[in-house]
Structure formats: structure tokens, C-alpha cells
Image (spheres, rainbow, N blue to C red):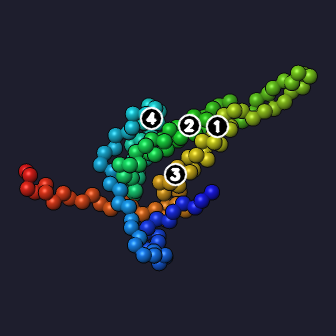
Amino acid sequence: MPRKPKPHALKVVSGTTRGKSTEATPARLSGTTPPAFISDRARAHWPALADLLADMGVLGDGDLTALGLLCETLTEYLEARDTVARDGATYEATTEAGAVMYRAHPAVAQRNDAARRLQSLLAEFGLTPSARAKVSGLPDLRDDPAAGYFK
């Protein structure tokens, strides 16, 4: 799997910029309305995550879909975790020969898969200790110079 590109700020600090190294300047978040595709349960996580990422200065308008996926994945993880806590990690199954076997509850695999995807999405947003050091904030929104003329 190819490595993810190093953020421009890290290239500058480490002195590995060669020639013209341009930094993309995405627009900083201008609103916190969740996308329509996320479920009501995922919407419950939206305000806290959006506020946290906006305060960190890393959430741009182009990140709303990814943040929606983060909310959905967090919801999936919590639901699977609650199912395992309620029903247990294993269940009894009887074989054709009459023997009793213990099998992993399907929610265990769902929880583990959601945890893996959640970890990946958290790292993308810089919400893990190791990823936080690699994420730089977005520039502040620039004032529109023409705004003073059109009052």
C-alpha cells in the first residue's frame, strides 16, 4: 500500500521541499449542518465532532462527507458494542451430532470491523495521538476586500 503524502507543513519543517512545493488551501468550515445522508443516530454525534474539529482548525467544507462517515461509523461501533455487552461475545450452537459448540457472536466481528474503520477515520482527522502531530490547521477565512464597497 502506498504511503500517504506528507502534509506541506511537515515538508517545510523537515526541509524536504524541492522546487515549487505548493500547499492546498481548502476553505475553512463555514457551516455545521450535517449532510442529509447520515442517520438520526449519527446526527447525535455530529455537533460534538464538528465543534472539536472546527476548534482544531482542520475541518473544511470539503470534509463534511468524511465527517458524516465518521459519525456513521462511530454509531455502528457503539451499537455493536452494546449488542456484545447485552448478549455476550459468544453463543451456544448445537451440532448435528448433538454436541454443544460456542461460537463468536456476529456482533463481535461487526464491532471489530467498525473499530478498525473508526480508528482509520479518526487518524484522518488527526484525532489520535500519533496523527495529531501530523495535522496542521487550515488557514483562517480571508476577509473579502470588496465587502467594504458593497454595503
Q: Amino acid at mark 1?
A: Gln
Residue wearing tag 3: 122
Report the side of 87 relative to 2 (left or right).
right
Q: Earlier in the sequence, mark 2 or mark 1?
A: 2
Q: Which mark is residue 38?
A: 4
Q: Hey, which residue is sitting farthest front in the picture?
A: 19
Residue wearing tag 1: 110
Residue density around tag 2, few if under 14, some if 14–19, many if 20 or more, within 10 Å: many
Q: Amino acid at mark 4?
A: Ile
Q: Earlier in the sequence, mark 2 or mark 3?
A: 2
Is the residue under label 3 in contact with that under label 1 (CB below 8 Å)?
no
Is the residue under label 1 in contact with that under label 2 (CB below 8 Å)?
yes
Q: Earlier in the sequence, mark 4 or mark 2?
A: 4
Residue density around tag 3, few if under 14, some if 14–19, many if 20 or more, within 10 Å: some
Nearer-the-camera pick, 150 or 44: 150
Query: In the figure, 103 relative to 125: above or below?
Result: above
* Residue at figure coordinates x 65%, y 42% from the top left: 112
User: Can residue 12 be seen in this snapshot?
Assistant: yes
Secondary structure category for the residue under label 2: helix
Report the side of 12 relative to 2 (left or right).
left
Whole-number angstrom distance, CA of label 4 to CA of label 3: 17 Å
Assign the N terminus to one quadrant of the image: bottom right
Is the residue under label 2 in contact with that under label 4 (CB below 8 Å)?
no
